[in-house]
Image (cartoon, rainbow, N blue to C red):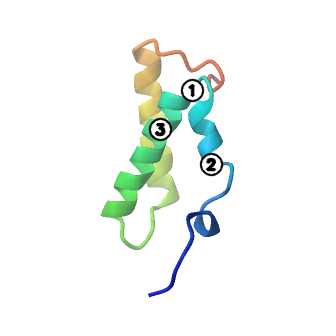
Amino acid sequence: MTNMKLFDIIPDRLFTLLVGSNKQIYAEALLLLYDQAQIERLGIRFNVIRDLLQEMLDTLRELNEDIAVLNT
């Protein structure tokens, strides 16, 4: 087994998303990615994760969550 380091796999600045005003949204998105990675062992299909993230954002908008930076 190789000794992989966390930041050899993910970008150094990934966790900076978790200190901004939309940290809850980014945390939910990361958990969604993780869940899909557990389901899709051969890799997550782009269209699947795109649709799931869009659904998550739409739900947050419907609940009037503050996603000012992400509003398009």
Q: What distance separates the C-alpha of mark 3 from that of mark 2?
A: 11 Å
Nearer to me, 37 or 23 = 23
Q: What amino acid type is highlighted by mark number 1? A: Asn
Nearer to me, 56 or 2 = 2
Give the mark, 3 or 1, whose residue is nearer the N terminus: 1
Identify the residue under disc 2: 14
Label ID, residue 27: 3
- In the displayed image of the protein, which residue is found farthest to the left? 39
Picture residue at 31% right of the left edge, 62% below the top? 39
SS type, badge 2? helix
Identify the residue under disc 1: 22
Which x, y percent locates residue 34? Answer: 40, 54
Which x, y percent locates residue 57? Answer: 48, 29
Looking at the image, residue 57 sits to the left or right of residue 36; the answer is right
Q: What amino acid type is highlighted by mark number 3? A: Ala
Neighbours of disc 2 within 10 Å: few (<14), some (14-19), many (20+): few
